[in-house]
């Protein structure tokens, strides 16, 4: 008997959405952050709202410090300003003993205005104006030279500077991480780094303070840091043998991952994120193995996202509900890619702030901008949300505040929940007057 051919068709799954382990992908609703009701936060400070937890911030830093303590000493953390340079965030790090790691004149001035002494600043970055270099040397900052043009500027400064110049250089190297970030600093493997040191250290008023590298970001391979440390030490001892100068610090940059989930990750980050101890052990072992007897340079680390992502949450409310052409729910939220730049490479994990009876279905989350690219999530499992309902987007503390754009909408307030429960405003919500402040009337 002939059967009629039924053409195959693709159907979008709806109903309870399951991950490969058959668990629902929606986390349980959480109506509070650090004991403060979310409803109270949005009522007092509006929506959207960035909320930082001081407790999570200091606990995270402490967990990295504790991991390194048994592996090497001395270790000093330098707070990577660009990751989040709100004064209130920087202050927490400085109170916990972190240096300021800055990459521009604006960031240098910000650190100084926050009360950081020049000697507690690490000055990195591809461009350092000559007047800034002069000031940074005079104030005792740790300067990491990035290019041969900068070498020329420093050689010129050495002629007139009232103080001898102590310099470090930034080195890029192959630590097994692809792509190699080769546009910052001097290539190690091609011999450029030695050439830069030769030019600098030939001057009798310039001495070597340290070596720096930053091998990339969200590095899931602790051993890459061991390779970087080993290669930097080899360069350091070459300089010691040739110029008789011993480095005082070894700066391995940042790049430790955060619990935010990268797009394309099959599992959730807690399945395969190495623990801080794994990085500390890899670096400590490399140092203990390759340091010359009696030499204990200060190990500097400039972790950014790994220290601050987890402490930041964005609260965002449903403005409008729509139905996509394929039948999925689409929610227009009051926060978009103008505030969450990291939505480009992170798969944001929107969480409920109240319990729902109805099942989760695949939904889309759009931002409020009149731009097609303004999508926060194209496929997340959510129950039917009400208009005005607040979602919590965790792990957004890194880069979003500093990279958020004043585009179409005003930027929201940023608050911090202190360890003792008080809520402080770290930055007030933007106003139209503020946006137009520099424009002639
Ligand atoms: C020199 C330097 N240090 C530290 C960081 C912080 O990196 P991450 O957020 O990956 O830890 C960066 C970021 O690009 C950097 O360029």
Image: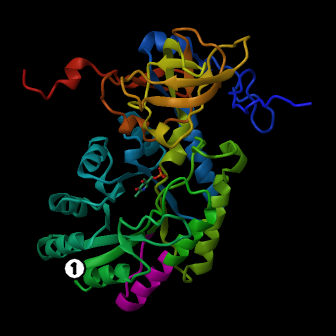
Q: Residue at x 18, y 59 (%)?
A: 129
Q: Residues within 10 Å of mark 1 (few under 14, many from 20)?
A: some
Quarter occupied by residue 56: top right
Residue 380 falls inside the magenta stretch: no
Q: Residue at x 46, y 60 (%)?
A: 253
Query: In the image, 296: left or right of 245?
Result: right
Main secondary structure along the magenta-highlighted residues: helix
Say above or below: 190 vs 98.
Answer: below
Say above or below: 317 vs 140.
Answer: above
Residue 275 locus on image (x, y percent): 67, 52
Residue 214 locus on image (x, y percent): 45, 62
Q: Secondary structure at mark 1?
A: loop
Q: Which residue is mark 1?
A: 205
Scheme of image coloration: rainbow
Residue 294 locus on image (x, y percent): 54, 80
**Nearer to me, 222 or 300:** 222
**Nearer to me, 206 or 269:** 269
**Nearer to me, 19 or 148:** 19
Say above or below: 72 vs 384.
Answer: below
- Report ligand 1 position as a quadrant: bottom left
Query: In the image, 257: left or right of 400?
Result: right
**Nearer to me, 384 or 258:** 384
> Farthest residue toward the front?
1
Magenta range: 232-249
Say above or below: 357 vs 280.
Answer: above
Q: Residue at x 70, y 20 (%)?
A: 360
Mark count: 1
């Amino acid at each position: 008997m002939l059967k009629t051919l039924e053409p195959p068709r693709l159907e979008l799954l709806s109903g309870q959405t399951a991950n490969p382990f058959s668990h629902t992908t929606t986390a349980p609703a959480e109506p509070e952050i650090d004991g403060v009701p979310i409803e109270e936060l949005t009522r007092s400070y509006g929506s959207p709202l960035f909320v930082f937890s001081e407790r999570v911030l200091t606990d995270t830093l402490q967990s990295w410090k504790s991991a390194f303590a048994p592996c090497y000493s001395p270790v000093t953390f330098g707070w990577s300003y660009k990751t989040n340079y709100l004064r209130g965030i920087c202050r927490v790090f400085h109170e916990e003993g972190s240096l300021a790691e800055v990459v521009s004149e604006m960031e240098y001035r910000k650190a100084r205005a926050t009360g950081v002494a020049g000697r507690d600043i690490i000055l990195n970055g591809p461009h350092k104006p000559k007047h800034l270099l002069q000031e940074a040397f005079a104030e005792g900052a740790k300067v990491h030279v990035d290019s041969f043009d900068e070498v020329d500027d420093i050689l010129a400064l050495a002629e007139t500077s009232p103080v001898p110049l102590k310099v470090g250089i930034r080195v890029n190297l192959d630590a097994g991480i692809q792509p190699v970030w080769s546009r910052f600093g001097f290539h190690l493997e091609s011999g450029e780094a030695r050439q830069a040191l030769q030019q600098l250290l030939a001057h009798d008023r310039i001495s070597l303070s340290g070596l720096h590298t930053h091998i990339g970001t969200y590095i899931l391979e602790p051993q890459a840091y061991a390779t970087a440390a080993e290669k930097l030490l080899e360069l350091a001892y070459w300089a010691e043998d040739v110029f008789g100068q011993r480095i005082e610090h070894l700066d391995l940059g940042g790049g430790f991952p955060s619990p935010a989930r990268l797009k394309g990750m099959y599992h959730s980050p807690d399945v395969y994120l190495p623990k801080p101890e794994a990085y500390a052990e890899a670096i400590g072992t490399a140092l203990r193995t390759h340091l010359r007897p009696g030499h204990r340079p200060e190990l500097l680390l400039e972790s950014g996202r790994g220290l601050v992502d987890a402490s930041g949450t964005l609260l965002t409310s449903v403005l409008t509900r729509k139905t996509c052409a394929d039948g999925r729910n689409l929610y227009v939220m009051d926060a978009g890619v103008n505030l969450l730049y990291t939505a480009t490479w992170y798969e944001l994990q929107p969480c409920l702030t109240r319990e729902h009876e109805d099942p989760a279905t695949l939904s889309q989350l759009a931002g409020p901008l009149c731009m097609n690219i303004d999508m926060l999530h194209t496929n997340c499992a959510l129950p039917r949300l009400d208009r005005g309902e607040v979602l919590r987007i965790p792990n957004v503390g890194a880069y979003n505040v500093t990279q958020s754009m004043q585009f179409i909408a005003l930027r929201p307030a940023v608050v911090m929940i202190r360890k003792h429960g008080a809520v402080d405003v770290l930055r007030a919500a933007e106003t139209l007057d503020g946006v137009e402040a520099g424009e002639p009337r």
